[in-house]
Image: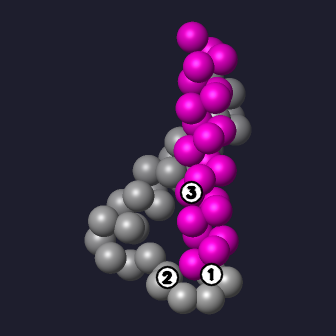
Amino acid sequence: MNSLVAASALFLAGGLSVVTMGAAPLQGVLNDFFWAGLALSGFLAIVGLEAAS
């Protein structure tokens, strides 16, 4: 697993823990960047893990 996939997986895990604790930003541009970052990191983690296997 390369470092980009590992960083994406860590960001995804951290972001999902933020969501479950209720600390996610709910309004504005920060909300858009937060969810877009989670979506992108989830995509990169899945693609990277599939490519590695």
Disc nearer the start of the sequence (2/1):
2
Magenta part, dominant SS: helix
Quadrant of the rendering where the C terminus is positioned = top right
The residue singled out by tag 1 in the image is: 30
Q: Residues within 10 Å of mark 1 (few under 14, many from 20)?
A: few
Residue drawn at the location 62% of the way across and 15% of the way down: 52
Residue 50 vs 22, above or below: the answer is: above
Disc nearer the start of the sequence (2/3):
2
**What distance separates the C-alpha of mark 2 from that of mark 3?**
13 Å
**What distance separates the C-alpha of mark 2 from that of mark 1?**
6 Å
What range of the chain is rendered magenta?
31-53
Residue drawn at the location 30% of the way across and 65% of the way down: 20
Q: Secondary structure at mark 3?
A: helix
Residue drawn at the location 58% of the way across and 36% of the way down: 45
Q: Secondary structure at mark 2?
A: loop
Residue furthest top in the image: 53
Tell me whether the residue at label 2 lies in contact with that at label 1, contact meaning CB atoms closer than 8 angstroms.
yes
Tell me the tag on residue 25: 2
The residue singled out by tag 3 in the image is: 38
Q: Quadrant of residue 38?
A: bottom right
